[in-house]
Image (cartoon, grey):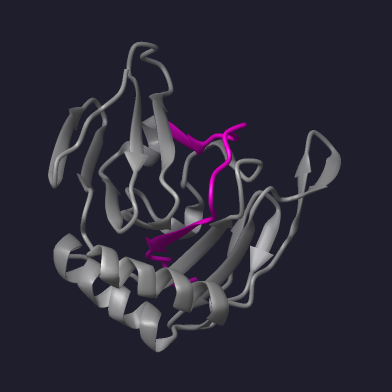
Amino acid sequence: MELFSQEKEQFVLPNAELIYVSNFFSKQESDGFFNTINHQTNWHHDDIKVFGKTYKQPRLTALFGDNQQPYSYSNITMYPEPFTTTLKTIKNKVEVYAKHHFNTLLINLYRDGNDSNGWHADNEKELGQNPVIASVSFGEERPFHFKHRSIKEERYKINLSHGSLLLMKGEMQHFWLHQIAKTKKKVEPRINLTFRTLIHS
């Protein structure tokens, strides 16, 4: 099933709160943010272990934060750099809309259709019980697939547009999985900013 969104859509789903705003940033803002982030970011290409074998992660990443607290997922531990002025500007607008403070930002660069992010949930213990995740997209539109862990018919897709905001809240990370799948289509790069709140250890 595909979900079509207008400027803002709030979805009624079991065990989840999901809000999508297709044009959270204007095209002019989004073009500028994409270029600035792409050129200013110190991108990492980490190794990832899958079923005992080591591969290069199929995307580039970077971590930013307002403290030195590391973030770990999929046997990768990342250490944050300070927020840039551009990232602070984006974060402030997202925080006002979400009514939530974020202290950490994981950025993904999907260089082409071969770059992806497999089925997963953002349920690391550092994120707390019911984390709020704010996902901002710049660049090429890519489909965001998400499915309920136990209700088979609860499976959807949203095309994340240039300058869009996706908010995931409530119990979603416990009951749902999401992915950005590979595609054989020729696609341009996409930068995805995922704002999170790490619980201080």
Q: Quadrant of residue 187?
A: top right
Residue 198 is a magenta residue = yes
Rendered residue at 28%/54% (across/down): 164
- Establish if 154 lies above or below 122: above
Rendered residue at 34%/11% (across/down): 153
For the image shown, how many numbered marks are present on the structure?
0
Residue 143 lies, in percent from the top left, at 42, 36
Q: Quadrant of residue 136?
A: bottom left
Q: Residue furthest right?
A: 53
Left or right: 72 in relation to 165: right
Q: Quadrant of residue 115?
A: top right
Q: Is residue 131 visible?
A: yes
Q: Residue furthest top?
A: 153
Left or right: 116 in relation to 51: left
Residue 99 lies, in percent from the top left, at 16, 65
Rendered residue at 55%/71% (across/down): 63
The residue nearer to you, when weighing 122 against 181, is 181
The residue nearer to you, when weighing 119 against 101, is 119
Residue 133 lies, in percent from the top left, at 34, 54
Q: Is residue 103 visible?
A: no
Residue 107 lies, in percent from the top left, at 51, 64
- Establish if 61 lies above or below 123: below
In the rendered image, which quarter contains the N terminus?
top left
Rendered residue at 70%/53% (across/down): 75
Residue 163 is a magenta residue = no
Give the magenta part as a residue range.
Answer: 177-201
